[in-house]
Image (cartoon, rainbow, N blue to C red):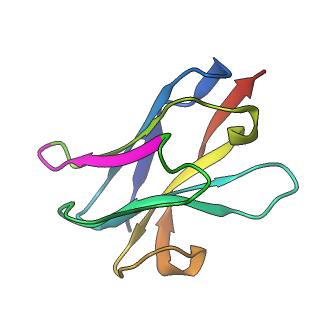
């Protein structure tokens, strides 16, 4: 059973930055999704194993970046210029396919980490 351990969420002011990390218990293509209250879970970014390709949602392009450290088997989501609309529960997830832009492309999910942006 794949385990995904997330960390890095918190409270930040608008315009600030946060970095999320996720450590899977195997080598997979990885993605980040987010879900705000009353909204559907939406794709944020994804990266292949070992990291040659990435994909980023238009809503965060230029502000968020996904990367991975293969030596530590950890995936990161660097979030800059945060806006109140970025407030959500952020999930990392594992996939065996590419591209992996949809919820059903992923077979394992982390517990989620809360990101709250105050305006």
Number of numbered discs on residues: 0
Does the rendering let one see residue 31?
Answer: no
Left or right, 88 with respect to 38, comes to left
Residue 17: % across, % down: 51, 24
Decide: is 109 above or below 83: below
* Residue at 88 percent of width and 55 percent of height: 38
Left or right, 109 with respect to 72, comes to right
* Residue at 70 percent of width and 29 percent of height: 116
Q: Quadrant of residue 24?
A: bottom left
* Residue at 16 percent of width and 50 percent of height: 70
The extreme front residue here reads 62
Magenta span contains residue 66: yes
The stretch of residues the image draws in magenta is 64-71
Decide: is 69 above or below 105: above
Task: Please tell me whether the stretch drawn in magenta is mainly helix, strand or loop.
Answer: strand
Residue 106: % across, % down: 48, 74
**Considering the image in quadrants, where does the N terminus appear?**
bottom left
Left or right, 11 with respect to 109, comes to right
Residue 19: % across, % down: 44, 31
Left or right, 8 with respect to 14, comes to left
Magenta span contains residue 73: no
Residue 102: % across, % down: 56, 76
Viewer-nearest residue: 107 or 89 = 89
* Residue at 77 percent of width and 64 percent of height: 40
The extreme right residue here reads 38
Q: Quadrant of residue 97?
A: bottom left
**Considering the image in quadrants, where does the C terminus appear?**
top right
Does the rendering let one see residue 29?
Answer: yes
């Amino acid at each position: 059973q794949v385990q995904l351990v997330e960390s890095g969420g918190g409270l930040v002011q608008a315009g600030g930055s946060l970095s999320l990390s996720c450590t899977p218990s195997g080598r997979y293509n990885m993605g980040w999704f987010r879900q705000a209250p009353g909204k559907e879970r939406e794709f944020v970014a994804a990266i292949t194993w070992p990291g040659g390709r990435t994909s980023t949602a238009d809503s965060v392009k230029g502000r968020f970046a996904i990367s991975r450290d293969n030596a530590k088997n950890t995936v990161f989501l660097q979030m800059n210029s945060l806006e109140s609309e970025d407030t959500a529960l952020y999930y990392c997830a594992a996939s065996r396919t590419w591209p992996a832009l949809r919820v059903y492309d992923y077979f394992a999910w982390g517990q989620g980490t809360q990101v709250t942006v105050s305006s």
